[in-house]
Amino acid sequence: MIAGRRVLIVRNSETAPEGAFGTWLAEGGARIEVMRGEDLPAREAEAHSADLVVLLGSPHGVYDTHIPWVAAQRGIVARLAEAGRPIIGICFGAQMLAAATGGHAEPIGQSRAFLGVFANEEAADERFRGPFVRWHGDHFRPPPGAEVIARDGGTVQAFRHANRIGVQFHPEATAEIVKGWVARFADRVDGPAVLAAAERIAPPHALFEEMVRSALAPR
């Protein structure tokens, strides 16, 4: 399904790389190009010509439109969606995908932030159940007409909309990636417990396959 396809990965923060998802894509024969989120505005044409665009996480919120590249990315994602380009969004990427196509994203409040490993209490597809690493202080409302695939703790955790799919959790996160997040949030999480839980999660290959299938399926 993915072999030979050109996949543009938009890395919106060096602290949130493509991790296990990138490895799975490469092993499946995808032709991967990685681009910084800051560089996307000047290289929008490359996104339009990709077979699949993957939007990754960021410590910023999609409402941080005072940051030029964040504001620009919302417009670019809206145009990609309007053109029918396949898109996968992860965490910030899912929020960006929702906000750019008629949904909304906003802070959830620090007291309710999800930092750790959680399963989704509601999942229309068991591949989206988890447990998964989750690391977010924002939440979103999907665009009109979207299919909600998973929810937890009053937040939407996955949605599908035409040939676009977004997940709020981090299926790509490896233990090494989580180690960096734990270090930056050491005053808010039980680091050893979170790392131990993250290390028990095998890369969710069946989920990756379904995400890609959803985005690339003929419409």
Image (cartoon, rainbow, N blue to C red):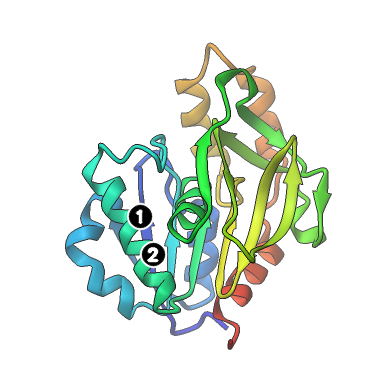
Residue 52: quadrant of the picture: bottom left
Locate residue 53 relative to residue 129 in the image: left or right. Answer: left
Which kind of residue does numbered mark 1 sit on?
A: Arg
Q: Please name whichever residue, 86 or 71, is drawn nearer the observer in this view of the structure.
A: 71
- Residue 143 image point, x, y percent: 57, 59
Whether label 2 touches label 1, CB < 8 Å: yes
Q: Residue at x 31, y 55 (%)?
A: 73
Disc 1 secondary structure class: helix
| Three-letter amino acid code at the position of disc 2 | Ala
In x, y percent, where is residue 154? 73, 37
**Residue in front for this viewpoint, 14 or 42:** 42
Q: Is the residue marked by circle 1 packed among few (<14), some (14-19), or many (20+) residues within 10 Å?
A: many
Q: Is residue 12 visible?
A: yes
Q: Which residue is mark 1?
A: 74
Q: Quadrant of the N terminus?
A: bottom right
Point 49% across, 51% down: residue: 19
Q: Residue at x 49, y 39 (%)?
A: 177
Which residue is situated farthest in the top direction here? 187
Horizontally, residue 58 falls left or right of residue 128, namely left
The one nearer the camera, 29 or 42, is 42
Residue drawn where x is 69% and y is 35% of the image: 117
Instruction: Say if 96 sits above or below 196 in the image.
Output: below
Q: Which mark is residue 78?
A: 2
Vertical comparison of 161 with 111: above or below: below
Q: Position of residue 124 (x, y in %)?
A: 81, 60
